[in-house]
Image (cartoon, rainbow, N blue to C red):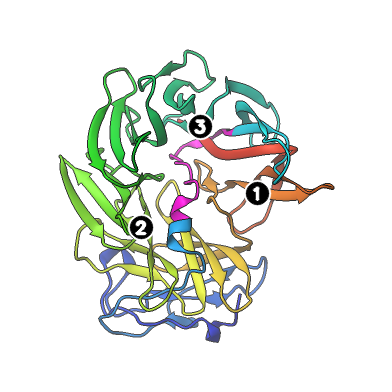
Amino acid sequence: MAAAAALKPESCPDALHPWQGRAGAPWFSVRRARSGTDAMRARRGDARLMGCHGRARLAIAAGIALAALVAAAPAQATFTGSNGRIAFTWSRGGVSDTGPAPHLVGIVSVRPDGGGRRLIVSRGTEPRYSPAGRRIAFMRKQRLWVARADGKHARPLTPRGWLVGQHQWSRAGTSLAFIRVSRTSPSHALYTVRVDGGTPRRLVKAPTSLSLREGAWSRDGKAIVYTQFRNSGRPLVRVIRSGAITTIVSLGSMPTWSEQGLLAYEAPSRGAMLNRVCIRRPRPGVTERCFGFIDAATTNPVWSPSASHLLFNYTSQVGGGEQTWLVRVDGTVLSRAPGATAPPPVFSPDGTLLALSVMSFRGDPRLGYTYLYVRRPDGSDTRLLVRGGQATAPDWQPRR
């Protein structure tokens, strides 16, 4: 990380929301850890990076184009509980520009120590564990399916011929939200379907693309947050509740709802071709709080299962490299780890570990392989679980 003096805020708000402490106190402050890991601790009264006052919103920097970030595969949802197995999409073979594509095997699960690997869904992709961990949703032949967590008793939830994309569990575990993609036009639609049977119900039909991430459902299960792209390609953050659609952010993407009802998302900073990670209440017109720098990027927000922490990528624009930061919602920076990941990592249900897929190149000719790792948010205790192929889209099973 660059020296503290190099991290320049553009501006700071003059009042704080209740979840961010007393009004007038600096929201975001950072100091180096005195010992231990390459982590940072932050407390009010230490080296304060954003202690100014004013009515302007905090601005940030993000070194990756907004559209490219939205197109990246979303992180998976993690619900609270004890740590169960990790499921992922497994394909054999490496990736190259000229060679054959990797061979899809299906969904494989493994223990967090790397043992007990087993195939649970042949030819399946994009696993999502239910909040109680007893069911798993997945894609197979462009249809949405649900099965027991061990892959048995699988059945489709969507009709043949539908092209289904991103899907997310409701917090009660009774329904799934998913995106249906038109085969003949750019239009997308947002649906929900009950996992115990029934006909999918359309909530939104849009002439352009829609996108869902983890934390798409509100706490009460009555609202869903999503990204909608305008014809210009500029994204909106929107919420649908009881049939009414509300635009929350007029230029933003990758929204994710925390268990405590806060929205985190990406938005470009004013006057810069950069993104920032922001937090706000899901109501139009409220002030957002952003992790922002003039010379660094913050992207890919992911809530911890308890919603007490937020994880995001930090990318320096002045040669400081990439890091993964863990912060509290009051702005306290708890740790940073070398490197950044896209798609973002997945929290363990107890919030102490991350599962992440990392691309590595080896051999001659050079082939790309996606390895599956587990580590702590501060980068320590890294363990390699799976190698030798493509281990993508991990999700962590909660046990209750």
Residue 303 picture location, percent across and down: 43, 52
Q: Secondary structure at mark 3?
A: strand
Q: Earlier in the sequence, mark 1 or mark 3?
A: 3
Residue 84 located within the stretch drawn in magenta? yes
Q: Nearer the viewer, mark 2 or mark 1?
A: 2
Percent x, y of residue 343: 54, 50
- Residue at image location 43% in from the left, 67% down from the top: 275
Q: Secondary structure at mark 2?
A: loop
Vertical placement of 45 versus 261: above or below? below
Q: Which residues are magenta?
A: 69-88
Q: Position of residue 289 (x, y in %)?
A: 33, 69
Other-residue count near label 3 (Cα within 10 Å), few / some / many at <14 / 14–19 / ≥20 = many
Q: Quadrant of the N terminus?
A: bottom right
Residue tagged by mark 2?
A: 233
Circle number at residue 127: 3
- The residue where tag 1 is placed is 358
- Work out which quarter of the rendered image holds the C terminus and state it: top left
Q: Residues within 10 Å of mark 1 (few under 14, many from 20)?
A: some
- Label 2: few (<14), some (14–19) or many (≥20) C-alpha neighbours in 10 Å: few
Tell me which corner region of the image, top left, top right, bottom left or bottom right, holds residue 36. Answer: bottom right
Q: Nearer the viewer, mark 3 or mark 2?
A: 2
Residue at point 50%, 23% (across, down): 149
Residue furthest front in the image? 184
Amino acid type at image mark 1:
Val
Q: Residue 131: which disc? A: none
Kindly check if marks 3 and 2 are in contact, taking CB atoms under 8 A apart as contact: no
Q: Is residue 383 shown left or right of residue 193? A: right
Q: Is residue 398 visible?
A: no
Position of residue 291 relative to residue 182, above or below, is: below
Q: Is residue 114 visible?
A: yes
In percent of width and height, residue 85 lies at: 58, 31
Give the answer, above or below, for where 158 lies relative to 285.
above
